[in-house]
Amino acid sequence: MSGAFNEVYQYSLKDPQGFWGEAAEALSWYRKWDTVFSGDSATTYRWFAGAECNTCYNAVDRHVEAGRGEQPAIIYDSPITGVIRTITYRELQDDVARFAGVLRGLGIDKGDRVILYMPMVPQTAVAMLACARIGAVHSVVFGGFAANELATRLTDSTPKAIVTASCGIEPGRIIPYMPMVNEALRLSPHKVDSVVVLQREQQTAELTPGRDHDWDLAMSTASPVDCVPVKATDPLYILYTSGTTGSPKGVVRDNGGHMVALHWSMKNVYGMTPGEVYWAASDVGWVVGHSYIVYAPLLYGCTTVLFEGKPVGTPDAGTFWRVISQHKVAAMFTAPTAFRAIKREDPEGKFLKQYDMSNFRTLFLAGERTDPDTLHWAQDHVKTPVIDHWWQTETGWPMAANCVGIELLPVKDGSPTRPVPGYEIHVLDLAGNEVPRGEMGAICVKLPMPPSSLPTLWNAEERFLDAYMREYPGYYETGDAGYMDEDDYLYIMSRTDDIINVAGHRLSTGAMEEVMADHPDVAECAVIGVEDQLKGQLPLGFLVLNAGVSRDEGEIVSEVVRMMRERIGAVAAFRTAAVVERLPKTRSGKILRGTMGNIADGKEYRMPATIDDPAILDEITEALKGVGYPRG
């Protein structure tokens, strides 16, 4: 390896104040920071304390003032509705300033929270940026979540307003949003003053007089509002992620550190140049959508693609190639599950041959571990570097990646390459000692974390410390397990908790078990993640029924599946449960989910030394055969 990456990486660790101070100079500030870094690096610290800034100004107004107002900011491509629309930076500035006026007219001010329950449409990005413009804190909730999930977020964030749409659109079906919004408002003890509704032509919603406001009508009468200075350490947004208790964790992102890290990443991690087209094929409901559909590309002055469609079926497995070719995309970021879907539909890559890919330089994959088969297929057909990289909702940007803007390092199967500058990553044993290279352990980041990483959880400082800081003092606990090789390449192998990854969406098995346990015939239950060729993992349930239950087991399973869809949402992809007499446990009562997962996936496993009754594993094996596991 040459020294370009090593030099940058070492500088970031030896002089983080100098490193991130230089990076921050590329952005505009109302007031410069008192110090780049301040605080106790063991737990509580802040980046750019004393500074004042505005994320919306840096993402939108700054480019207009620099004479680039006619450059496309957003390309909205919706094969589901047949609409393609280009929005320039000047048009985006006008829309955002006007919607900020709508929010201000509803009494929203600096520090107030606004829930966004929206589909993949440009108005979602407009609403996010409008919140940032006036210093309000947005919390985007994925439109596929059920009313109960929305209600928990309403209760925790206590917003003044909800911004939503009449419906979301999936291939072959329309999903009305207002019934879920109304049900969430009924379930939550927190009362919301105002609901702004974007009426879509595919299905309109009935509005509640006095509470609900039509988006278009409100925009037609609103006065535009300028950006307001906020502290660099003020929250920009709250994004809820699954917690092992079933209660969502509200990850807080600040303004200053977030925009510095994301701006830096566009050139150095993704190799982009201002004016080029960047596409993150994700959803604004997830952290990828926040960071790399909306904020990072706009902060860096790129054109971002906002795509309302699927990798297959809208209309075919060539959709991704059509978007890349038509809009001259330079770099794309998606989840491996998307490429597994394309590969399944078009294994020979015939659709790809129909499109001009000459502008396309790099494919980035993240959201789950990239299996070697998918990596090789993508490399062979796309014929560009395929970069696996690893990060989390909590960090907001990559922790490990092949930083193509600094130096393209050799690709190793199964590895997201090396820690990104700013992240000092160690692999630790249970006692907190570093393990030898090549050995599995808990992947942890030495504190302090670089800019953009969460400073806390919303109204839950103790939970923040318990979840991330206390297990390994002096380190951030990622919750992932894996190892590092002699070349400092990182390998992410599994979660150290019970979060499973379904098509790039991190979901809590604990939350699913709470739903199953509510069925009146269920005495005990468990959920594991099983390998799936398309989605990476799928949840598989185990049900122990109450004594004396004589109903048809298939009916009970169907009812549980329906409950899961209603309370967690279709995003969980929960379709199967096995009825068993008992669950395998340790003598202390811990359910052996890992062992059950190995049986379901057809993997070898060791008999756990602490198992209560070894014979039960034979029963689990037979039950799994009854529902089609192991597959193949």
Image: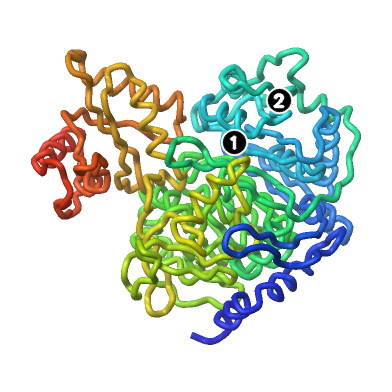
Q: Is residue 599 left or right of residue 537?
A: left
Label 1, on which residue? 141
Q: Residue at x 79, y 63 (%)?
A: 27
Q: Name the residue type under label 1.
A: Val
Q: Secondary structure at mark 2?
A: strand
> Residue 197: which disc?
2
Closer to us: 597 or 449: 449
Marks 2 and 1: which is nearer the front? Answer: 1
The answer to whether residue 304 shows anywhere in this view is yes
Closer to us: 586 or 533: 586
The image position of residue 363, as x and y in percent, is 52, 62
The image position of residue 83, as x and y in percent, is 65, 38
**Which quadrant would residue 199 be assigned to in this image?**
top right
Q: Residues within 10 Å of mark 2 (few under 14, many from 20)?
A: many
Q: Name the residue type under label 2.
A: Val
Q: Is residue 172 left or right of residue 201?
A: left
Tell me which label, 2 or 1, sits earlier in the chain: 1
**Which quadrant would residue 197 be assigned to in this image?**
top right
Q: Secondary structure at mark 1?
A: loop
